[in-house]
Image: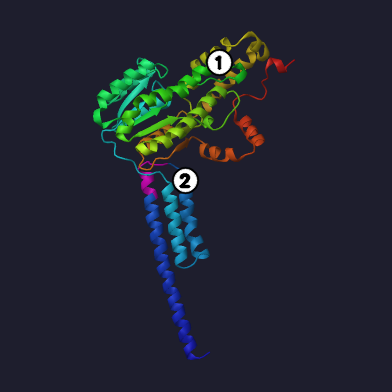
Amino acid sequence: MDLDDYVTMDVTSEFTHDDIVVYSVLYSSVTVVFAMAVLSKFLTNEFRFGFRSFLSLVVLFLGEPLCQFLVKGPGGVVTFAVGCLFVYSILPASHLPVGNKAVLVTGCDSGFGNALVKKLDSIGMRVFAGCLDCYSPGSIELRNKCSQRVHILQLDVTKEKDIEVAADYIQTQVGEEGLWGVVNNAGVWYFSELEMTSEKLIRRVMDVNLFGAVRVTKSVLPMIRQAKGRIINVSSLLGRISMEGNGAYSMSKHALVAYSDTLRQEMRKWGVHVAIIEPTGFFTGNMQEHVIKSRRDEVWNSLDEKTRATYGQDYLYSTYSHILASAQRYPADLTPVTRCMRSGLLSKRPRERYPCGTGADIMLNIYPLLPVWLADKVSRAIGIIPWTIQPVGLQE
């Protein structure tokens, strides 16, 4: 090997070393910018640890070394940067300023609605809190704890007169600014197998959960369009997954999802965004002991003699006793749901669907891919009805 070869090798080695330094600086710069952007979202409480934040950490700690070793040169830097941009794009967007925005929330006597009113009031929004009973303990609590920005309204979503009066009042308050958002949260739940559910109860569930949302939305839609605002419909995990004993409720929520999907497409031309909140199980007003026992008695009293003889009172009462015993396992912290509602109302880049609760994202993404026989087994495994309880008709 002559002197020229050594010189060539030295130049090549020096060039390679310089490349390594340059690429290291580029990788580090991308990493720092991405990490600061993600950290800022954590610090501003725009999202919590979950699948998307886990994906951010994977990109941070594994993306850079993988790109350096597998995709060398400029291509590696570009691949890493594009990956960071993609992950950042699926993270929650920053929020719009509250300003003078006003929101109508239904079902505020307890549960999600009550918690949301307090949250929105705490960030300075004007809130019209629709309550089934404007003198209920929950509405009185809102009066005592919230600011004057919160207006308590008598609003039974099954009564046209209540809705008309509420809409007229809201119109006088918001004027030409319009109504920024409506959160259709009012809902009712009965646990009863379909054969044990009277038509009257099915109609009641549909009247509140589906037609209540339709009535309220239609009454305030001109004000929503005026503000180019948001419509938030509170569905459920059971709006896309069916389980034994939840037939009437699941029917109403499946229909609400179809209504929301159609409305979202129709409102796009008006600049109005429609989103669905899909919670898993939480300890709300529907899970309180006196409410559960009241619903149990309503179901039994609505049955005809033939159905009573087929299933038996012990079957229904034992199932509800199991529900009562299991109620405490549901989280009482409603923050995951109210955070999604707030994001739907104020995010600069709102999502169409907000699964919220333990395992909601995974369940709603994987369940539709399962064959029917396996999906039924999964529904049975996570359902409420104990396997050890049987109707009278199967005990003979």
Could you say where residue 37 lies in the image, as x and y percent from the top left?
Answer: 37, 51
The amino acid beneath tag 1 is Glu
- Tell me the SS state at disc 1: helix
User: Residue beneath label 1, please?
Assistant: 199
Q: Quadrant of residue 392?
A: top right
- Tell me the SS state at disc 2: helix
Q: Quadrant of residue 240?
A: top right
In this rendering, the answer to whether 197 lies above or below 58 is: above
User: Is residue 218 covered in magenta?
Assistant: no
Q: Quadrant of the C terminus?
A: top right
User: Is residue 40 covered in magenta?
Assistant: yes
Tell me the magenta residue range. Answer: 38-47
Whether residue 193 is visible, yes or no, is: no
Could you say where residue 235 lies in the image, as x and y percent from the top left?
Answer: 47, 30
Residue 52 is labelled as: 2
Residue 318 is labelled as: none
Tell me if mark 2 has few (under 14), some (14-19) or many (20+) residues whose alpha carbon lies within 10 angstroms of its own.
some
In this rendering, the answer to whether 327 lies above or below 344 is: above
Q: Which-is-in-front pick, marks 2 and 1? A: 1
